[in-house]
Image (tube, rainbow, N blue to C red):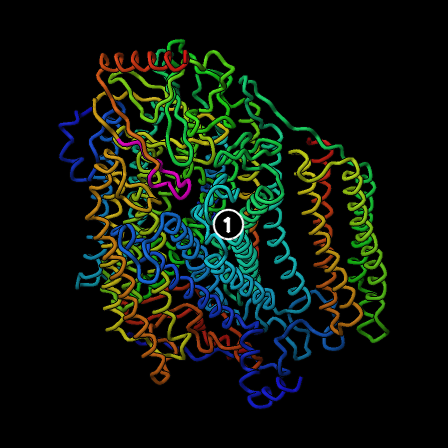
Amino acid sequence: MIRRLQLLLIIAGLLLAFTATEAFAQGCAQCLDSTRATPPAVQAAYRHAILLLIGAASTLFVSGLILFRREP
Amino acid sequence: MPTILTPPGIYQPRRPGRPGDLGEGDSGSGRRPPTDKRTGGNGDGDNWSDRPQGRRGPRERLSRARIGLFFALGGDLMFFIALVSVFFVAKTSGHFDAYSRFINDWLPTSIPSILWLNTAVLLISSVFAEIARRSMFREADLMDEWFGFGRPTSRRAAIWLSATLALGVLFITGQYVAWSQLAAQHVFFNSNASSHFFYLITVAHAAHLILGIAALVTALTFLVRSRQLATRQVVVDATVWYWHAMGILWLFLFALLEYGQ
Amino acid sequence: MPSTQAIAPALRFWHLPVDGSWHGRALDSHLLLNLWIALGLFTLANALLVIGVVSHRRAHRPIHKFTLEYLPLAAFAALFLFLGVRANSLWATQRYVGAAPEALQVEVIGMQFAWYFRYPGADATFGRARNELVSPAEGNPAGLDPTDPDGTDDIVRPQLVLPAGREIDLSLRAVDVVHGFAIPEMRLKQNAVPGTTQHIHFTPDRPGDYAILCTQVCGLGHYRMQAMLRVLPALQFDQWLRQQELEQRLEAGR
Amino acid sequence: MSAPSQKLRKSPARAHRIARAIFSTNHRNIGFGYLVIATVAVAGGTILSWLMRLHLSWPSWNFPLHGPILPEEYLALVTMHGTLMLFFVLTVAPQSGFGNLILPAQIGARRMAFPRLNALGMWITATGLVVLLCAFLVPGGSPIAGWTSYPPLSATALAGPGEGAGQDVWLASIALFTLGGTISAVVMLTTMVKLRCTGMTWRRVPLTVWGWFTAALLAVLAFSVLFAAIVLLFCDRHLGSAFFIPHGDVINSIPLSRHGSGSPLLWLHLFWFFGHPEVYIAILPGMGLTSMVIANFSRRRVFAYRLMIATTLAIGFLGILVWGHHMFVAGLNPFAGTAFAAASLAIAVPATAKVLSWLATSWRSKPFLTTPMLFALGFVSLFIAGGLSGIIVAQPILDEYLHNTFFIVGHFHLIMAMAGVFGLFCAIYYWFPLLAHGRVLSESLGKWHFWLTLLFAYTTFLPMYFSGLAGEPRHYAQLTGLNPPAQALLGATGPAQVHITIGAFALGLSQLLFLFNLIRTLGSPAAANSNPWSATTMEWAPHGLSEPSPDLPTPVVYRGPCHYTDDGASFIPQWESPQPSTAERE
């Protein structure tokens, strides 16, 4: 019951995170003049950075939880 | 307020408790062999399953130390993750000059080749550390000690640990050489964006290794001083796992600096 | 979408200033919807809390039903989803796409502790600007590069004057620290981040004078870092702009 | 040479006791140490907030011995108030403080893991507080960049008074805080994972422990990221790097010529990656305690207990993913705004589940309205009052109007500050008999204290919603002497300002009632009843909180918490053996 719930919540969270990060970027997305817009390389860099942070944090969170559960 | 339903109290085995003994594991001298991984008594009035969890002998203390180390290293990992994510962003980001051209002023720092040597040294030191850790748990020697034939485990472990210590110091010296080489080429912390990261990452890792060296020294003193075999095992085990973690971390950081720029 | 008059009493109840921009209407109606829902739920929940606690008879079997556990939750989830989708459609219309090409371009420059506004002038192109050259004391608050011919006819003013009923494309610049560009009565807010250009577009439609605030703490003068937005009817604005261009040409000629 | 030894010989017992208190590794002393830190911080923070309110309501009023408060002084007050309250009160007291005091007993352990490390964490945190308070004394005064310290304002001394030594002191203090917090969290996590007593399976763990566990996990993950950000900001300030300073930045018409082109947004990301979990670290223990206390005094099981465990974890987990909702108008890509808004609204679902459970648990239960119960119910009310506005500001388009207005201030003061404080008072009134040898705080005084605090909490923080909706921005040193349209807009909030100020003073002063209650009760003789609230969780077991010693029975748990008969007349605590016959057979 609760295991399923947790699993659902965690999966939902991860999905949320990773579908979300598709769009993660910085700076000006609406500039008419492309020279002022944030270059895609930078946006990609931010995306990777955010993915890295979220990925590492959620992995550690889940593994900590598993540790707690593994003890009787 | 309501009344309390009180069934008769449950049977509580009373241990002959030495004052100050919280049931912390057992000294290698007496009662049960320290290699015995079972929890649950075998007749000698020292039934460990009556003890609360977490106090059931060496194994419990060992896994407690390991779990504590795991969480601490998890936090530490997040520190380096943050640095690395900033590294990724700084690598690509730039600015628009007066003529609205995008300027990415990232000049990769040339990594001194001595870092390869240092990496090798660190890996070997990790191997030595692992040998030391394993030797702390070799059952035959543990039984020897339990029967009172000296402390073979600690002697062997001490040798390997001192080798690790030496190599660790060598690694730090190697890093220092690398920094002075860069300084000779007039590459300092604030020379450019990538040199920030080179120094930041290497210095942060070196700081962790110096902590590790302190831990190694502590472990060695314990090996010489501590009477309790369990304590010696825990200290050596935790130290070595920390050392391994720092070695693996260095592999990633070095790969990042060497190929990631 | 309700008109301003229709929701005026509601605005007054919630102390909201009347808005003067097109997207403000939709924003207001969504905000008011949220506020009423919040007020309703707040009252309901507190009422349930008090009634449940003070009721004298104790319900013997405590309620433990799957329906009671998950149906209200599902209902609330649906409510949040509805609000979120509704809000996001507004957000998308305002932010996902930039301003139309024919929108009036104005550059906003934030510095400790003042706002300056730059109009491209007759040639409809902004001249080069460099932060190092910024110095309000020497009459160059925008940091215009004198070597750039495009810059000679740029109009820089400490006051934002805009025409009613035409889309405005603001590009925000900050010289020193992060500033928050906000016009509460236009339901507009966007930080000006040094090193980047932030665009925001809107259409003022009620002539009048409005407050431009700084909403991101930027130093000791933060509280007095304000400017005035004057929205003029289209014709008057054209007159104003022509006059400014004239003055600018005289200055440049001198 | 001989003088100290003389003194020692004069009062050896006293010196010994002091030394023991300082170098104690006993989790109770450490917990009390954390509470002392929090008390000092909350007293300081309250006084600072009073000064802010006075200045905001009557800007021209001259303070005795000081004169009028200058704008930079006002910003310094805001910064220090926020830092003290959020870091050293709302994080330290519920998590580390009561965590150390109660947590071991509640999982049937008699001690924390790694006692020496634990003590070290407490002393590092204490040093952090002392360092922070030193910011008032350094030249230039305390920092003015707010508790979020956005660069470039916080990245150079040029940006304003207090951004020199003051900001450095601030950084040092917070670095120490993160260090101490991480240590304490690691100790708590290890204790919760390893030291649970026999039979304390994860299904039987009280919700309070789940709250502490999730908060500790978040602390380990978030604090080290803040530490990294602080290191980078320090490099920007003193080592000439440019992680957060954009290329060609000019402050006070002095160009900061740096290599590389950083971005302030980078700091925002790192800071809020810490900042949002931090909020949950402050509130999760209170949520858990509220569930347990409401269940205990309603004599009911917690409604949907397992769902409550799941929601606690879900709130913690989603808390890692939503930091972007602090950056909707800060230059974040609008698509990212949508994504973060979705994640933030997702958190509203588990939070709603918690509220529903609290309502359902107490619903028509004819509860005992003791002071701890009242504070728990107050927590629920304030949580609702602050949470509903949270749903509003989670929508980017509405945040565009409300961001950095007093609407936000009202929101987080109600849901985090006030709910957090009510959780703390609930903990104090509820666990006081355990910590003070069976003494129970006076109920009549306690009820007065509760009603006054609740009344003035709402009097103070509800009007902030309205002044925020009227457009009043945060961090404004005064709302007078602005340019005409701004004056017309913000001057209207004048009455609200006075109202809030009076509320704030009343709120602070009504805490004297609690102090009086505390002192009077501590003066009274110790009581015998070891379980005055008829609670079912382990800390109330006989010898629940006593020192570890071999002659004490080892705690054993036989069932989950909150076992009451349906009429609520009687209950079975976790430590009562179900079938004594087996015990005889042994």
Instruction: Count neighbours of disc 1 (C-alpha within 10 A) and say few if under 14, some if 14 to 19, many if 20 or more.
Output: many
- Is residue D188 visible to the viewer in this orientation of the structure? no
Q: Is residue B127 left or right of residue C59?
A: right
Classify the position of the N terminus of chain D by image quarter.
bottom right
Task: Name the residue type under label 1.
Answer: Gln
Return the chain for callout 1: D
Give the residue at mark 1: D167
Q: How many marks?
A: 1
Name, please, the residue furthest toward the bottom: D10
Q: Given the current orientation, which residue lies at the most extreme front position?
A: C254
Q: Is residue C212 magenta?
A: yes
Relative side of B54 to D537, left or right: right
Percent position of residue D229, x then y:
55, 44
Q: Quadrant of the C terminus of chain D?
A: bottom right
Please determine whether, in this image, residue D392 is positioned above or below residue C245: below
Q: Is residue B204 left or right of residue D25?
A: right
Q: Is residue D190 above or below residue A52?
A: below
> x, y (%) of residue D102?
45, 68
Tell me if B15 is positioned left or right of B7 in this view: right
SS at mark 1 in the image:
helix
Q: What segment carries the magenta color?
A: C211-224
Residue B211 in sight in this render: yes
Where residue B259 appears, x then y in whole percent? 72, 31
Of D212 and B201, which appears nearest the observer? B201
The residue under the point 39% across, 69% down is: D536
Given residues C254 and D57, the one toward you in this image is: C254
* Of residues C5 and D253, the one drawn nearer to the viewer in this rendering: D253
- Confirm whether the magenta stretch covers residue B10: no
User: Image point 73% across, 41% down: which residue?
Assistant: B251
